[in-house]
Amino acid sequence: MPARLCQSCQALPNSFFEYRTSVPSSRRLHHVSFESLEASANGGCSVCSLLYTKLAPIHTLGPHPCLEVVGWDPVLQPDRLNSLRQDQGIFLQTSSYPRAEPGFPPKTLLDVGSGSRATLRLISTTDSKPGAYKYLTLSYCWGRSMPISATTRTDTLAQRILRIRLRKLPRTFRDAVAITRRLSLRYLWIDSLCILQNFAEDWQRESALMGKTYSHSACTLAAAASVDCHGGLFAKRSELPILGVTSSTSSSRSSFVLLKQRYEGWDDLFRQSPLNSRGWTLQERELSPSIIYFTKHTMLFECRETRGSERGESKGDTCQPTAKEDLIPKSLVKDIDAQRCMDEIPLERQVSNHFDWRKERRYEAWLEMVQAYSERHLSVSSDKFPGLSGLASELAYLLNDEYVAGIWMGDIHSGLAWRFPTNRENRSAQESNYGPSWSWAKVAGPISYDIVRRYHKSQKEILHQAASTMELTNPILLYASSIPAGNDLHGTLLSASLHFFGQSIPIRRSKKANYVARGESIAIIWDSFPHPSSDVSLFSLGQIAAGLVLVAHASAERTYRRVGIVQNLSPSWFTNAQSQQLILV
């Protein structure tokens, strides 16, 4: 009895099933949704039944993905490596932003040699000249544990300098070495191998230089589809929905059909990456001038000014991708995740002072980045400041600004206006003992900067209204002080304080257990609830129309600790309020 085929399968030409390596990929629209494929399979189409059986276990892209059937596509090694090498002139672009130390090399690099039989080993760059080493960096998830063979310790350093056995490294590391060699580069930086893992002093020193390490790399390879170091950069054939077919043109090689779900676009694929759940990897993305994200089916590309993929960009609801050479300028992308703190900011003709305007844009990007960072996981809670230290160091040079405890002094009023999630939101966030009371870092969990999110339309209106209310005077930051726990000024702190000259008023608790200011009830978003007998005051942050709720420090005069925040301050509350000096700790 002949096999039954649906109309979609009957439309596929016989040549589609032939194995080809010298011609471009053959793509055909098969079904407009997964549900359509399922219905056809249940209706008796033999080809759709085979495709559905292969695809159903990995169907995770939402209720209505468009499906493409791909005849031959360079997803598997070595073809994908060849594709990557051909495209490096397009995608491996260099950054144009100024650096504090041009030509910086990491202290230790992985020398991959040249050729498939080259010796793999660690080298020291201590005596090298600036710019002598062009290297790649690797961004990946460690996972629950890292194999000893994939780390360097004080007792294995000498052996690693002589030789590292490639076959003993995790799959992600092996793929990174293969890519470095295929791109005709000699050096690669991987944190677990290039930093001594049992020597705290080396880790502290190198983590403080992480900003330079990533910002000076030729390109970062990101293991975007792997939850640990074993997942690899490339998909194995066994991990893909592949159907073997009989080829009438080749008796020596087996042919296959590779089924891909529709490329939904850069943003959707990027957000699915496990890298976006880890704390340290955010800094790695922010700092890297150019990045190649390796997903199981597609490579994504990103530099300071543009982004794209090997499958182009999806045009609306159709399955017609643009050419991969058509990189999309980031200035045309509306998605929040598109702009990084260090990315190039295009000029706008209507802006008279380009420096101040660009600086303001970077402050806005920082607030968005911090909000995203607070949602990520850190295996060691005390890594919260070190996890951004490298980025803070690079950005401090770019902004010519002072950075203390996660906040820029040039944007101090906005930086202080973070809040806990409200009771109606996810209240998984908890106050911790990490960092000063006024820093977002004290929250173990997600925080929000929606009070001052300038590029959100409704928030812009609030800010413009507040700016016209001249009765609310911005407090003056006199100076900030901090004591670092080690040599990294932007790392873990022993203490930090802000010295202000501004307006504050006492607020009291009413018989109804709420707080009032000048007879008006105020809505407080609490960080932590103060003792009922505590002296509580409201400190105005000025024109952003928000204020910090403070309690007096028990042992220091004019010293206060933050316990909450109030939105939409009324100017009438601060009528005749005298400005005074106070210290936030």
Image: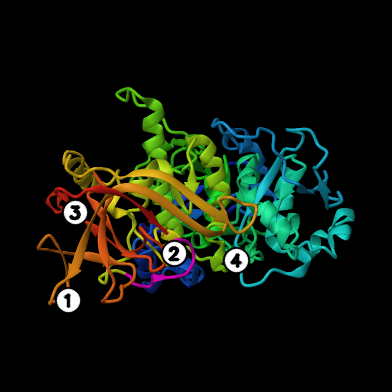
Tell me the CA gap for discs 1 and 2: 26 Å
Tell me the CA gap for discs 4 and 1: 59 Å
Horizontally, residue 548 falls left or right of residue 160, namely left
Q: Is residue 146 above or below residue 547?
A: below
Which of the image's four quarters has the C terminus? bottom left
- Inspect the image, locate mark 4, and give the three-letter code of the amino acid beneath it: Glu
Q: Earlier in the sequence, mark 3 or mark 4?
A: 4
Q: Residue at x 66, y 66 (%)?
A: 230
- Inspect the image, locate mark 1, and give the three-letter code of the amino acid beneath it: Ala
Magenta stretch, residue numbers: 426-436
Tell me the CA gap for discs 3 and 1: 21 Å
Mark 3 or mark 4: which is in front? 3
Tell me the CA gap for discs 4 and 2: 42 Å
**Residue tagged by mark 1?**
513
**Residue tagged by mark 2?**
442
Q: Which quarter of the picture shows residue 539?
A: bottom left
Q: Is residue 510 above or below residue 95?
A: below
Please tell me how crowded label 3 is: few (under 14), some (14-19), or many (20+) other residues with Cα within 10 Å: some
**Residue tagged by mark 3?**
568
- Inspect the image, locate mark 3, and give the three-letter code of the amino acid beneath it: Asn
**Residue tagged by mark 4?**
239
Q: Earlier in the sequence, mark 4 or mark 2?
A: 4
